[in-house]
Amino acid sequence: MGSTPRGSGLLRPRGLARGRGVKPVFTISQVPHRKQRYETVGDWIPGKPAQIRVSKMKDQRYVFLVALHEMIEYELCKMHGITDREVVTFDVNFEAERRMNLHAYDAEPGDHPKAPYRNEHEFATMVEMMVAQKLGVSWSDYEKTILSLGPKPKKLLVRPQLKQSR
C-alpha cells in the first residue's frame, strides 16, 4: 500500500512529502527567546514559505498553540492587507511604551485597541483557547509560562489598592 515498512504503523503514500512541486507553506521552528526579532514569544515572517518562530518552551503543547496562533494571525493579516512591517512597528513601539510603564507588564500588544491587527489577533486567540482546552492545557499556566519569557517589570508605578473594611 504505502512506501513505509510493514508493521511500522505509518500510512504514508510514496512520494507524499518529497514529491516534485511539493513546497511547504510554513516552516515552524523553535528558537531561544533571545533570538526572536523583537520582544515576542511567537513571530510570523512572510515569505515562501512563511516562517513561524516560537520561543522554546518545555511543554510542546504550548509551542504548538503559539505556532497555531501565528499561522492563523498571519493568514488573516495577509488576507486583510496588514503587513509584517505594520505589525512589527506596532509591537516594537508597544514594547518601548511598556518600558516607560505606559502598559502593564502582562499586556498583549495585539489586544490593544490601536493594534492594526487586533481583530486578526483576537480571532487567533479564540481558536488557540479552544484548542488549548481540547489539549488539556490550563490557560492560566500557559499564560504564566509565556509571561515568564517576556520582559520583566522594572518597577510598578501603580500598586494594587487594599480593600478597606467598612
Image (cartoon, rainbow, N blue to C red):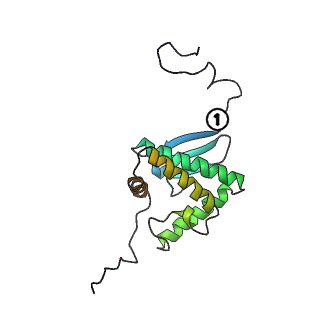
Please state which of residues 145 and 34 is positioned toward the viewer in this rendering: 145
State the residue at coordinates (64%, 20%). Answer: 15
Residue 40 point in image, percent of width and height: 51, 56
SS class, disc 1: loop
Q: Going by the image, does 163 lie left or right of 93? A: left
Disc 1 crowd rating (10 Å Cα; few below 14, some 14-19, many 20+) is few
Residue 23 point in image, percent of width and height: 67, 32
Please state which of residues 23 and 140 is positioned toward the viewer in this rendering: 140
Residue 55 in view, yes or no: no
Residue 47 in view, yes or no: yes
Please say if 96 is above or below 5: below
**Quarter in which the N terminus is drawn:** top right
Please state which of residues 5 and 104 is positioned toward the viewer in this rendering: 5
Q: In the picture, residue 28 is in which quadrant?
A: top right
Number of labelled discs?
Answer: 1
State the residue at coordinates (39%, 51%). Answer: 138
Please say if 44 is above or below 87: above
Residue 146 point in image, percent of width and height: 43, 54
Q: In the picture, residue 136 is in which quadrant?
A: top left
Please say if 29 is above or below 1: below
**Quarter in which the C terminus is drawn:** bottom left
- Residue at the far left: name it: 165
Residue 124 point in image, percent of width and height: 57, 53
Q: Mark 1 is on which residue type?
A: Pro
The residue at which mark 1 appears reads as: 24
Q: In the picture, residue 123 is in which quadrant?
A: bottom right
